[in-house]
Image (spheres, rainbow, N blue to C red):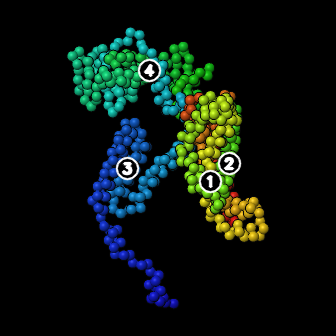
Amino acid sequence: MSIPPSVTAAAAPPPAPAGTLRASRRPSSLRGTLITIGVLSVIDAIAVFGLFMLFLQESWIPFGVVLAVTVIVNWIYLRPGWLPAKYLTPGLLFLAVFQIFVVVYSGYIAFTNYGDGRNGTKDDAIETILLTAQQRVPDSPAYRLTVLDQFGEYFFLVTDPEGEVLLGSADQPLAPVSGFGTDSTGRADSLPGFTTLTFGDLLGNQAAITELAVPLSDDPNDGALRTPDGSNAYLYLSTLSYDAATDTFTDTTGTVFRDGGDGAFVSDAGRELIPGWTITVGFDNFVTAFTTDNIRGPLISVTIWTFAFAILSVATTFALGLFLAIVFNKPTMRGKKVYRLIMILPYAFPGFLSGLVWLGLFNQDFGYINQVLFGGASIPWLTDPWLAKFSVLFVNLWLGFPYMFLICTGALQSIPEELTEAATVDGAKPWAVFRLIKFPLLLVSVAPLLISSFAFNFNNFNIIYMLTGGGPRDVTAGVDAGATDILITLVYKVAFGEGTGRDYGLASAFAILIFFIVATVSIISFRQTKVLEELN
């Protein structure tokens, strides 16, 4: 069957306007070209600096990634066309850096022993152990010293007792150099490419310079030069000797320290040398979380309180927000605009700032609540475990009900009044109308928001950390956990807290557990909301 010419003409795509084709082929304006070149110049300058630093640190994989990304970005923005790529590239880069990399790296850390005392490689640990165990050799000869600076790194330019001039840094053993300048005493005091530190510079960086140890040679057992005054350096030897053949340390008493297999050198008596190094431990962090008594107990308590805090926060804020929305939805009520403006004021304050304000109000001795509302009573709002939990929920209610008030107001106003009028005509009471008609229809709109609010409160770090800091502290716990800690604050304190040290591996394992909990609850909840959608 032949196709009528009119049908063929209708099915064919309309020709693009001539003006559109001319616009797409039109070269970029001079202003746009200059802006592109200017922005790329800044990006390239930052990238070159980063590549230079990565090259000095011999970090070849990050070096290759940065180089490849820089080349691709320049190719995309200097090439004509490819407009979608030009818009998508910034977003994809930020997504890769701040989302994908963070998630992947956290997952990797969860399977390591990375933390205080185990945050480097084995070679770094050996070098650090030798350096920290160093003591000055009695009557060691003085090396005349000049401290140099190059790109923020300090170097020792020393003139040894025989007159030979050597240069070295913390990462570069001493080696002979040439081309140096000397002062009137014959001491080397300058070198091309380096900046000689003045007396003021030495005083301003005294701590860093006195802690600097420059290896005498590639063999760490040969010792290092250190300086107490910035003008002379002396030989320091370690009280521990390292044998690379047997991979052991031996101290002056003959005690031998071997690689214990868990990222540290350990003696037969169980004595451990600090620092250790990072190794992969598999699922040990997850096993530790569930099998160590003084960690498992606090973890279970914190998990239960996290669910209670999230559920109660959503329930109380939703109940109060819905009640106020119903009240302010009455057509006969006067001054609704003023009341609504006052109601949303707590929503305008940052959560962490509100936490600090309420911290002062709840102060047991000087807080406004105890001094004014309770006549000077000494009520431990933040130091008693149960009162602290009540205080956290109360402050979160104060912060969260305006949001629920707003969404409930919008949802109520979207329900047709004809339904209410029809039910009233059929003899339904106001409570029955609300319970059987308005509330189910309201849930259709707000249920996804309630789920997202639950997820938010499940990780509501600000209010907990700023108000109670997770306290009061559970002194029996093996981790820094308190009565009001939720999982996210527990993760923070395990990773960065000062109470029991920093254990990034265990904290990352906790973070993965939180992810699975929140994901599971969200999936189940969203599936349940499909039942509500059938009401429509």
Q: Is residue 33 left or right of residue 225?
A: left
- The location of residue 507, given as percent across then percent down, is 59, 38
Q: Is residue 342 above or below residue 249?
A: below
Query: Where residue 46 is drawn, which disc sits there?
Result: none
Label 1 or label 3, whichever lies nearer to me, is: 1
**Residue for badge 2:** 316
Q: Is residue 441 above or below residue 59?
A: below
- The location of residue 511, given as percent across then percent down, is 60, 42
Q: What is the spatial separation of the Cα atoms under label 1 and label 3, in whole angstroms?
A: 48 Å
**Residue for badge 3:** 70
Q: What is the spatial separation of the Cα atoms under label 4 and label 3, in whole angstroms?
A: 43 Å
Q: Is residue 197 left or right of residue 61?
A: left
Query: Where residue 405 is drawn, which disc sits there?
Result: 1
- The location of residue 17, given as percent across then percent down, is 36, 76
Q: What is the spatial separation of the Cα atoms under label 2 and label 3, in whole angstroms?
A: 51 Å
- The location of residue 437, given as percent across then percent down, is 72, 64
User: Which is more toward the observer, 424 or 197?
Assistant: 424
Residue 531 seen in the current view = no
- Where the C terminus falls, by quadrant? bottom right
How would you rate the neighbour count of disc 2 (Cα within 10 Å): few for under 14, some for 14-19, many for 20 or more? some
